[in-house]
Image: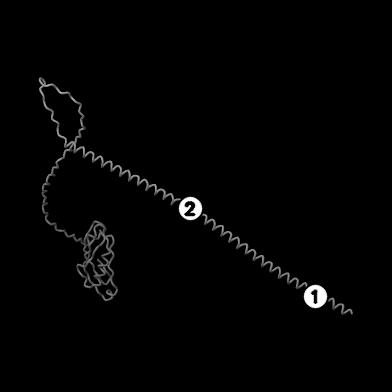
Amino acid sequence: STISAVTSKIILLLLSCLCLLSAAIFGLVGSYRVDVLRADLANANMARDAAEHRRVTQERELKTRETAVAGAEAKIAEAENKATKAQTELLKLQNEKAELQSKLDASRNEIASLQKRIGEAGPAASPSQNPDTASKPEQQPTTSRPSVQITQEPVKEATPPPLPQPKRRKIAPSKAPQVASTPEITSYSSAKALATFTPLPKYPPKVRSDGVTGNGVCIVSVDPASGRVTAASMAQSTGDSTLDKSAVNAFRKWRFKPGTVSKVRIPIEFTTTGASH
C-alpha cells in the first residue's frame, strides 16, 4: 500500500511537471508570436509613415507645379494683352497715317487748282483818261486775290574738275653691280689666341693600330655674331677618309670670340703618338 501511494504521488508529480513544461512551451511560442506580430506591426507603421511622407511630398510638389503653371499662364495672358494693345495701337497709327495721307493729297490738289487758276487769269488792263475833260468814275471796292509766289532755287552749274596732269617718272641712275667681297681666311697662328674652345680630333683606334698617319688642312666658316663654327671642310686631305671625318667632326665644335674671325685655316697632323695642329 505504501508503494502504491508513492507511485501515485510520483505519477501526479510527473503529470504536473509535464503540464508545467507544456505550459512553458506554449508560453514561449506565444511570446515569439507576439514579438513577430509586434515587429510586423512596427514595419507596417513605418511603411505607412513612409507612404504618408511620400504623399505629403507629392502634394507639395503638385502645389508647387500648379503655382508655377498659374504664374506661367498669368505671364502668357499678360503677354497676350500686351500684344493686343500693341495691335490696337498699330491699327490706330495706321488709321492716323491714312487720314494724314488723305489730307496731304487734298492739300496738294488744292494747291494744284490754285496754280492752274493763277495761270489762266490774265493781267487786267485799265483805260487812261484826261484829268481835265473827263470825270473820274466812282471807285468800287475790289477784292484782291492772294498772290501765290513761286520761287525757283538757283541751279548751280557744275564745273568739271581739272584734268590731272601726267606725272613725270623719275628714272634713278643705275648703279654698278657690287661684287661681294670674299671673307678673308685667317691663319691658325693668328686665330689661335681668339679661339675659346679647341677640342683635338680623335684618333680612331683601328686606324691607329693599322699605323695609318697623315696631315692635312681644314677650312672652317665662323658666324661672326656668335663665334660658332657653321661649316667645316678639308681643303687638303690627310689621305684617309676616316681621319678626314674625325678632323671635320672635331673642328665643327670649335668656338671663337664673337666678331673676330669669319674663316680660319687649321692644319692637322695624325701621327702614331696622336693628333696635333
Task: Answer few, some or many: residues within 10 Å of disc 1's Cα (few below 14, many 20 plus, some between 14 and 19).
Answer: few
Picture layout, residue 215 above or below residue 54? below
227 displayed left or right of 27: left
Q: Position of residue 160 (x, y in %)?
A: 13, 44
Image quarter hosting the N terminus: bottom right
Q: Position of residue 177 (x, y in %)?
A: 12, 57
Q: Which mark is residue 70?
A: 2
Q: Residue at x 78, y 73 (%)?
A: 19
Mark 2 or mark 1, earlier in chain: 1
Image quarter hosting the C terminus: bottom left
Q: Residue at x 16, y 35 (%)?
A: 121
Picture layout, residue 85 above or below residue 201? above
Q: Residue at x 15, y 23 (%)?
A: 137
Q: Which residue is mark 1?
A: 15
Q: Position of residue 38 (x, y in %)?
A: 67, 65
Looking at the image, is mark 2 or mark 1 nearer the viewer?
Answer: 2
Picture layout, residue 27 above or below residue 60? below
* Viewer-closest of 48 and 99: 99
* Viewer-closest of 73 and 39: 73
Amino acid type at mark 2: Ala
Dot 1 falls on a residue whose secondary structure is helix
Figure quadrant of residue 138: top left
Dot 2 falls on a residue whose secondary structure is helix
Tell which residue pokes out farthest to the top in this image.
Answer: 132
